[in-house]
């Protein structure tokens, strides 16, 4: 079933805030306890004989091309792993059974059994992602020399410090934390939500069935604001029409994006309206450093170096105010960037709901173009576009660059490696176009990780003038100022 979220601001009082913060702290205690028990059982699993015996078994295969023997080997290995997991009790149901002890402690005064189950499910998912290597890669990057697939530096779930848990959710809307009418009901708390009757998004969301509710804490200008996230059954409101079945090709760079469809094309930079706040951040960070040194003189020697073993813990009121300014500056930029990503995704989906693009490593971009990627966040844009295209009835198709090599390929069949400084594609066959726009055009014609040359030749007669017009428009936009990657 399709699911979407409607976020509503809650009208809270000081009594509401005190109660919710105490329950968030209880959720943190439960999270840390379950995580500690889960990691302990994971270590026991890795040390068990059953688990090591399962690792030594032949892997086998599944699928249509697998033989009967390979399928039997695969099934036997999976059964051996499940037997080892049951022996140590690592499944989420075992952890839920272990967590029932919280209903007989002080936790029951703050959280119900359903809220505790939701926390256990979240922790169990993070442990599984760490165990199977789905979580973030090693912090050492390419220098990682660990033999195992993931090490303690590679996405290991962390314990939450005080104030780090910002949300509590339920798994049902029948008891405990639930939505009733136009308010959130949580035990003795009845918190009304601020609903705009003229807002079509609110009206559309509230007309659907509520699966469960999540309470979310946001710190805005140093003040706590609470939101109710209603997880609803259905599809979100589509305010921007899209062409069903139309294919759109994308070429995404660290700071630019090229989009080509059958009848439209454009080349633009990511988040051009976003201001550069690096100077303001640097000023505030230097001010915080000076205040930290003034508040903790015993942590630094006569040359201003940090004394080993001492940590500066004292914070003045002015230092706290400066930290609030820095956090608020970063929050505003993140929210504005999120809004710009949504607008750009809507513009892409107006051209078609089937999006094709190359699969690239955004983590590698962070290492190579850290400042640009940190400001524009192309990976977050792709994640938002994937969700929006799926809701629109299409999807985002990513193909490997190993087989296609679109930036080096001409549709006449010639493959020529180009340096990054060469921003225009020119071939002996007479094809000439801006490099990013041409790659986006070729991306439209990729099927099953293979470039369809016949389709490219068929579309090129109408696409050639389209790409030239898009490049001229990109050069004239923003008063003629453009990134050097445009060419």
Image: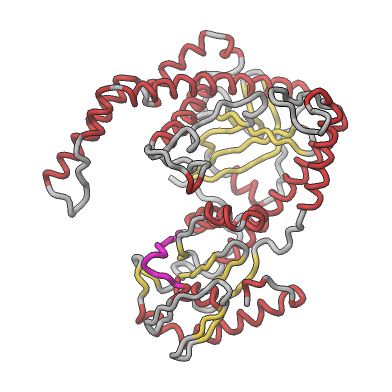
Q: Left or right: where does residue 6 sit relative to residue 296?
A: left
Q: Position of residue 334 (x, y in %)?
A: 69, 49
Q: Position of residue 162 (x, y in %)?
A: 66, 23
Q: Quadrant of residue 181?
A: top right
Residue 403 forms part of the magenta stretch: yes
Residue 394 seen in render: no
Q: Quadrant of the C terminus?
A: bottom right
Residue 165 forms part of the magenta stretch: no
Q: Quadrant of residue 394?
A: bottom left
Q: Left or right: where does residue 145 sit relative to residue 178?
A: left
Residue 168 seen in render: yes
Residue at horizontal 59%, vertical 10%?
A: 106
Figure label count: 0
User: Observer-nearest residue: 251 or 153?
Assistant: 153
Q: Position of residue 358 (x, y in %)?
A: 46, 64
Q: Quadrant of the N terminus?
A: top left
Residue at horizontal 61%, vertical 43%?
A: 6
Q: Left or right: where does residue 336 sit relative to residue 397?
A: right
Judge whether 148 appears above or below 62 on screen: above
Q: Left or right: where does residue 486 sit relative to residue 252?
A: right
User: Observer-nearest residue: 89 or 310?
Assistant: 310
Residue at horizontal 48%, vertical 46%?
A: 143
Magenta stretch, residue numbers: 394-406
Q: Position of residue 133 (x, y in %)?
A: 41, 40
Residue at horizontal 39%, vertical 25%?
A: 42
Which color scheme did the rendering employ for the protein?
secondary structure
């Amino acid at each position: 079933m399709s699911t979407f979220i409607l976020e509503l601001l809650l009208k809270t009082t000081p009594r509401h805030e005190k109660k919710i913060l105490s329950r968030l702290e209880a959720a943190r205690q439960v999270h840390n306890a379950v995580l500690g028990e889960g990691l302990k059982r994971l270590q026991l699993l890795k040390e068990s004989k059953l688990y090591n015996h399962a690792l030594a078994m032949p892997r086998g295969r599944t699928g249509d091309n697998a033989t009967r023997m390979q399928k039997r080997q695969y099934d036997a290995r999976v059964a051996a792993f499940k037997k080892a997991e049951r022996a140590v009790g690592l499944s989420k149901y075992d952890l839920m059974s272990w967590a029932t002890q919280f209903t007989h402690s002080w936790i029951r005064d703050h959280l119900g059994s359903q809220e505790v189950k939701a926390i256990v499910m979240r922790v169990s998912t993070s442990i599984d992602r760490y165990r199977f290597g789905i979580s973030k890669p090693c912090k050492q990057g390419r220098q990682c020399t660990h033999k195992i697939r993931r090490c303690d530096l590679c996405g290991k779930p962390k314990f939450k410090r005080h104030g780090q848990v910002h949300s509590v959710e339920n798994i049902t809307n029948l008891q405990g934390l639930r939505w009733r009418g136009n308010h959130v009901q949580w035990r003795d708390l009845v918190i009304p939500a601020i609903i705009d009757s003229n807002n079509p998004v609110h009206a559309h969301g509230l007309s659907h069935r509520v699966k469960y509710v999540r309470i979310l804490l946001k710190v805005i200008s140093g003040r706590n604001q609470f939101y109710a996230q209603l997880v609803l059954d259905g599809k979100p409101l589509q305010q921007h029409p899209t062409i069903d079945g139309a294919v759109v090709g994308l070429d995404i760079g660290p700071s630019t994006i090229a989009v080509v469809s059958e009848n439209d094309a454009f080349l633009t930079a990511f988040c051009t309206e976003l201001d550069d706040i690096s100077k303001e951040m640097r000023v505030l960070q230097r001010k915080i450093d000076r205040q930290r040194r003034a508040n903790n003189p015993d942590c630094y020697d006569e040359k201003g170096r940090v004394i080993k073993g001492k940590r500066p813990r004292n914070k003045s009121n002015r230092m706290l105010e400066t930290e609030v300014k820095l956090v608020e500056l970063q929050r505003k930029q993140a929210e504005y960037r999120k809004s710009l990503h949504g607008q750009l995704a809507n513009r892409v989906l107006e051209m078609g709901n089937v999006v094709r693009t190359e699969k690239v490593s955004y983590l590698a971009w962070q290492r190579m173009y850290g400042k640009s990627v940190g400001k524009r966040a192309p990976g977050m844009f792709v994640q938002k576009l994937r969700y929006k295209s799926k809701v629109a009835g299409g999807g985002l198709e990513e193909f490997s660059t190993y087989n296609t090599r679109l930036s080096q390929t001409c549709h006449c069949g010639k493959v020529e490696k180009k340096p990054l400084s060469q921003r225009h594609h020119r071939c002996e066959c007479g094809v000439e176009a801006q490099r990013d726009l041409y790659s986006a055009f070729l991306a439209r014609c990729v099927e099953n990780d293979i470039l369809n040359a016949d389709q490219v030749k068929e579309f090129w007669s109408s696409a050639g003038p389209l790409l030239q017009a898009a490049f001229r428009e990109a050069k004239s936009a923003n008063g003629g100022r453009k990134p050097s990657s445009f060419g």
